[in-house]
Image: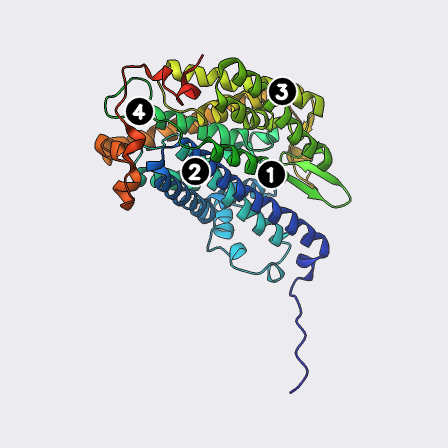
Amino acid sequence: MGAPTPVVSSFAGQVTSDLFTQDIFYAMATVCLLFVVVAVGLIDAGLVRRKNLLDTWIQKLVGALLAGLGMAAIGYAFWQSQYYQAFGTPHPIRQALHDWSLFGPAMTHFSQDLDPKAYPEADVFQIFAVFFVAYAMVGAALLHSAGLERVKALPMYIMSLILGAIVIPVALYYTWGSTSPLTNRGVHDYIGSYSLYIVVGVWALLLAWRAGPRLGAFAADARTMGPIPHNLSWTALGVGVLLFAAPFAFLGCGYFVSKEGYFGISLTTSGFGIALVNVFVSYIGGGIGGALIAYRTRNPIMALIGVPAGYIGAGASLDIAQPWEIVIIAFVASFVVYGVYRLLFVLRIDDKKIVPLALGGGIYSVLVAGIVGSGKHTGGYFGLTGEYAPQHASISIGWQLAGLGVTLAIALISGLVVILGLEKTIGLRVKEETEIVGLDEHYWHAPPTPYEDAPASSTPVSGAPGVVLADKA
């Protein structure tokens, strides 16, 4: 046998050690983002009744996968079009969809076979595509939480697919990425407060409103004790997984540039170390605030919710604020989230987590970023000049409000069309008999657990054991 033929890369510049370092960095961030999906599943697994446990996991995971499919198919490509516009590519949206859709050349060729003039740093952006898939999966997992124990699987799956393929990508295009139409003018975000949390928060509010509360959630029902969590230790475990995964996932929301530094996704000057410190001190600020609320109200769920309330409330500022500022921002965020939590109870909207955290915390997050980041440089891209020159724009509260308005419009209009459309056609909610029996038995023939749902007493729901985490003032 002769000597093996040497393998020669067509474009060796696409496979340098520097690029491989970035590949590993974004791959680790992506894996940690997937752990966030698991964390959300664990949190909900503890909050639902045992008779709905299996179906909760199945709906959440299938919905997340469908959202990821939508993002991989066309969503990521649409987000990429902002860079095509910045670099002056003719027909940027059409070309980006051609290149970066699931069947496009940038997603079907090895990086060393792609010309860097057309696809610079192809390996990095291919891995970043997977990061976006995981990002969409988190969005669907969060949305599912707003319809626990009562929303049918099919409408949930349709919502997840549309959310991942169209709605989140459109919001990402406008508000996330250094050359996006709004970022390039001064809108700032870091972890996706606009495109993930506010968008999902609006959809969650609409879903919980249109699906209605679970039986026994706000008024005694003779057929059920109401939605009493069956195992809060699972919820605590989910928060623990979140604490572990979130910091490394969030660090993927930026540019890791060798010999230049770490930049937030909007091209704000930041630091890898300070950003990581900020994530952890946001846990501390939010956790302390949540604990104070929990002891004052005897509501254990707030001791757990305080931690995510802290990092979501500080999320848009994690790359630009000082650690001491983040502690204050996160501490206040827990009270903002609790205020929305109480408002939903007054309005009889059955959602204890997603709307308070994602919508309430998300809006607070972007507005605070406009204050602590005021005047800081942002926008543009490396090596460009003119209207896309690096850091040519400045953060301001005015542009943060503009970003909020655009995001709310995208989320509200799309949510009303999709959720009301599903409600009027295939319906959102399972039958009352199905809800009483449990989704596990109905869909999966799992053994019934009637002891979980003994007939309610005449005691108001707000006084029933276990429901204190929804109803205590």
Please provide percent x and percent y for residue 42: 47, 38
**Residue underneath mark 1:** 244
Q: Nearer the viewer, mark 1 or mark 2?
A: 1
Residue 369 circle label: none
Q: Distance between the residues labelled 3 and 1?
A: 21 Å
Choose mark 2 or mark 4, whichever is in front: 4
Which residue is the site of mark 3?
A: 329
Camera-nearest label, 3 or 1 = 1
Left or right: where does residue 85 sit relative to residue 417? right
Q: Mark 4 points at which residue?
A: 225
Q: What residue type is labelled 1?
A: Phe
Q: Earlier in the sequence, mark 1 or mark 2?
A: 2
Dividing the image into 4 quarters, which one contains the C terminus? top left
Q: Residues within 10 Å of mark 4 (few under 14, many from 20)?
A: many
Q: Are marks 4 and 3 in contact (CB under 8 Å)?
A: no
Give, as a three-letter code, the residue at label 2: Ala
Question: Which of pointers 2 and 4 lies earlier in the amino acid sequence?
Answer: 2
The amino acid beneath tag 4 is Met
Which residue sits at x=58%, y=40%?
A: 245
Q: Residue furthest front?
A: 451
Q: Mark 2 points at which residue?
A: 140
Label 3 to label 2, Cα distance in Å? 27 Å
Q: Along the line of sight, which residue is nearer the eye, 126 or 203? A: 203
